[in-house]
């Protein structure tokens, strides 16, 4: 209690109040200093400066639209707050934000400067540039305006400025955008800007050139191999290129400079097609349907859902296009599919997994920056991280396709080796059979020859005995007649053996089909057979004609009568393939009518009744035209075609 009493003595209380006042004044001064905006001082050595943190102050419009007079007034001057991030971002989409920066030249400078907005996706930028009359010149920028209206025809937004010596100039910017925009403001000298822009466009040329090269190569592979995976990969690469062009502002500059409305949604079309083509490419490259049926259904469902959500957003809520993080869902599904199939032993999936690992890392970095981890956005590398990851992914996906082609070629080579081995075995078997047949024919020929020699010797003996044994003349005559009959039978036997040897090399249907492989070749042969000596109309006997409606048919120029190649042939009104009918005629002719209808049905796989009908008809024609067929030669069977 005595201590408390001393504290509240008069002198002690006055000192305490004085200390509190000093502390309050110090805190207020610190707050004023903290809220004071930093002025950028520019001299002749300044080439570039990126405004960040306290360099930029901002306020947000609340309800009504503010004018430059209001914003630059003393009342609003106190409402501006310094940026707590290196790069301010408009969190409330569709709401206008005001930003200001201060610049001062500390000496006379003999070069020109530009203020550049690095984010090309900002819809509207209204810039207020100080003039000599202590007022402001208004400039309208943003991708909601035609590209031709820009002062500098560059993908970014540039504002030319002049800097008077030792005079603070405050620049105000009213920014409004329907998607998250990074307010990156950069002061650059004109020379520095030209050098930077040329290097940047050269880099873009290399990047988009790589995309075109990859796409063209895979398009050629698709045309050559007819594998749909190459076409999906081309679509995927072109979608990546279109998306990057939309994000970089290159598309608005070169592809649709006079279509600002389309420029607002073009990136959404590109990123949707990129996801769809990525999943289609995954399905075909990794054979997901056979190796992982469950994942195959999942990816197809994601493709359908992604296309449906795109159309819903396009026709209902286009502002939802800004939620690009949904692309991580199909990306993750494709990435997981690659890992799953690689674990199951499919080697081409290894490069697929590596490529998607880079892409996944790039998406993850962008997603973390979007969530507020701005310290990750530390340099140009992090800003273009997704582009770099796209390049690495394209390289490794191309390696995955090449790995698959190598695997396919290896399997094909093995199949060809097996086929060659089988053909060699077949050749050996055929040679062995031919050797056996030759031995049999040789043995039979030797037997016949020996029998002929024996008969000849017997004839000599009989002739010698005839002079000695006249009384047995009648008996010898009878024996000679029998021997003559045996000679005839032996001769017939020799002819049968010879015919069997020839028939052992008969032309089968496969070899016959090489001469007449299809309907067209058969029709061509019939046309030459019918009209080889000239065409004459059956109605009016005119020799002039034109091609008819059916293959190789002919239409009369005079009366219009059209004659098919099948008319007046034995093939007319037949439903059997015509090359089989050709072979049927050939078999009957080559066997001289001795082949049975059952054998024909077995060889040609045609009903026995049909074979019997044609066999009877052809045998009759062979009998009627036997004199003509004797002179026909190898193509004698063709004489049986025309009725």
Image (cartoon, grey):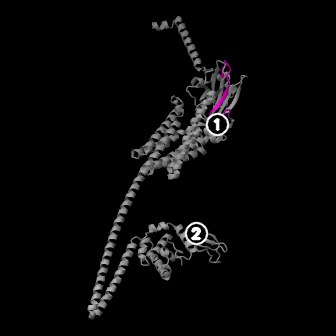
Give x and y (percent) for residue 403: 44, 46
Quadrant location of the C terminus in the rendered image: bottom right
* Relative to 245, 411 lies left or right: left
Q: Are marks 1 and 2 in contact (CB under 8 Å)?
A: no
Give x and y (percent) for residue 308: 55, 47
Q: Is residue 26 magenta?
A: no
Give the structural element (helix, strand or loop) at label 2: loop
Q: Residue furthest bottom?
A: 471
**Between 456 and 428, which is closer to the camera in this rendering?**
456
Task: Name the residue that disc number 2 marks.
Answer: 552
**Between 544 and 110, which is closer to the camera in this rendering?**
544
Give x and y (percent) for residue 21: 56, 11
**Between 415 and 278, which is closer to the camera in this rendering?**
415
**Between 338 and 442, which is closer to the camera in this rendering?**
442
Give the structural element (helix, strand or loop) at label 1: loop
Q: What residue lies at 50% left-to-right and 40% top-to-bottom?
A: 328
Residue 92 numbered mark, or none = none
Q: Is 155 situated above or below 59?
A: below
Q: Is residue 167 magenta?
A: yes
Task: Name the residue that disc number 1 marks.
Answer: 143
Give x and y (percent) for residue 181: 59, 33
What are the residue bounds of the magenta stretch? 150-169
Q: Residue furthest right?
A: 133
Q: What residue lies at 43% left-to-right and 70% top-to-bottom?
A: 507
Q: How many labels sit on residues?
A: 2
Q: Is residue 464 visible?
A: yes
Q: Is residue 145 visible?
A: no
């Amino acid at each position: 209690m005595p201590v408390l009493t001393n504290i509240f003595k008069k002198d002690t209380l006055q000192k305490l109040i004085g200390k509190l006042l000093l502390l309050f004044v110090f805190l207020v001064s610190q707050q004023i200093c903290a809220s004071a905006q930093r002025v950028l001082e520019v001299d002749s050595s300044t080439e570039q400066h990126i405004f960040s943190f306290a360099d930029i102050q901002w306020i947000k419009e609340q309800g009504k639209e503010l004018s430059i007079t209001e914003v630059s007034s003393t009342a609003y001057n106190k409402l501006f707050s310094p940026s707590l991030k290196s790069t301010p971002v408009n969190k409330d989409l569709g709401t206008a934000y005001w930003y200001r920066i201060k610049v001062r030249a500390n000496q006379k400078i003999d070069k020109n400067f530009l203020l550049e907005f690095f984010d090309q996706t900002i819809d509207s930028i209204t810039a207020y540039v100080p003039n000599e009359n202590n007022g402001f010149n208004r400039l309208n920028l943003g991708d909601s305006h035609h590209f031709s209206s820009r002062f500098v025809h560059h993908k970014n937004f540039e504002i030319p400025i002049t800097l008077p010596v030792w005079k603070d100039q405050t620049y105000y910017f009213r920014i409004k955008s329907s998607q998250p925009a990074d307010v990156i403001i950069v002061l650059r000298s004109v020379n520095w800007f030209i050098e930077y822009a040329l290097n940047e466009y050269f880099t873009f040329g290399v990047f988009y050139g790589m995309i075109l090269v990859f796409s063209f190569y895979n398009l050629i592979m698709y045309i050559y191999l007819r594998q749909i995976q190459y076409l999906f990969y081309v679509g995927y690469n072109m979608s990546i290129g279109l998306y990057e062009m939309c994000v970089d502002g290159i598309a608005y500059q070169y592809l649709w400079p006079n279509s600002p409305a389309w420029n607002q949604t073009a990136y959404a079309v590109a990123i949707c097609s990129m996801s769809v083509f990525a999943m289609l490419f995954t399905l075909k490259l990794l054979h997901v349907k056979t190796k992982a049926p469950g994942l195959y259904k999942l990816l197809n469902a994601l493709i359908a859902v992604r296309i449906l959500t795109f159309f819903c957003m396009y026709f209902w809520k286009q502002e939802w296009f800004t939620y690009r993080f949904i692309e991580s869902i199909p990306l993750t599904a494709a990435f997981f599919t690659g890992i799953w199939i690689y674990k199951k032993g499919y080697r081409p999936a290894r490069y697929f997994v590596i490529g998607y690992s880079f892409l996944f890392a790039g998406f993850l970095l962008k997603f973390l920056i979007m969530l507020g981890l701005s310290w990750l956005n530390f340099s140009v590398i992090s800003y273009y991280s997704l582009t770099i990851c796209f390049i690495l992914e394209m390289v490794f996906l191309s390696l995955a396709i090449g790995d698959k082609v190598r695997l396919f070629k290896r399997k094909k080579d093995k199949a060809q080796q097996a086929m060659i081995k089988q053909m060699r075995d077949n050749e050996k078997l055929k040679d062995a059979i031919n050797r056996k047949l030759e031995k049999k024919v040789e043995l039979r020929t030797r037997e016949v020859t020996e029998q002929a020699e024996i008969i000849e010797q017997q004839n000599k003996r009989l002739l010698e005995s005839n002079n000695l044994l006249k009384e047995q003349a009648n008996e010898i005559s009878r024996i000679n007649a029998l021997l003559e009959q045996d000679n005839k039978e032996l001769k017939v036997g020799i002819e049968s053996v010879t015919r069997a040897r020839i028939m052992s090399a008969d032309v089968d249907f496969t070899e016959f089909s090489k001469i007449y492989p299809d309907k067209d070749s058969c029709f061509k042969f019939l046309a030459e057979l019918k009209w080889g000596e000239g065409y004459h109309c059956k109605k009016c006997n005119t020799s002039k004609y034109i091609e008819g409606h059916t293959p190789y048919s002919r239409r009369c120029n005079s009366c219009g009568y059209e004659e098919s190649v099948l008319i007046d042939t034995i093939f007319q009104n037949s439903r059997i393939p015509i090359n089989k009918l050709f072979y049927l005629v050939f078999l009957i002719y080559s066997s001289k009518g001795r082949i049975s209808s059952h054998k024909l049905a077995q060889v040609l796989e045609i009903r026995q009744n049909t074979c019997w009908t044609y066999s009877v008809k052809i045998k009759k024609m062979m009998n009627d035209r036997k004199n003509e067929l004797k002179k026909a030669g190898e193509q004698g069977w063709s004489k049986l075609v025309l009725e």
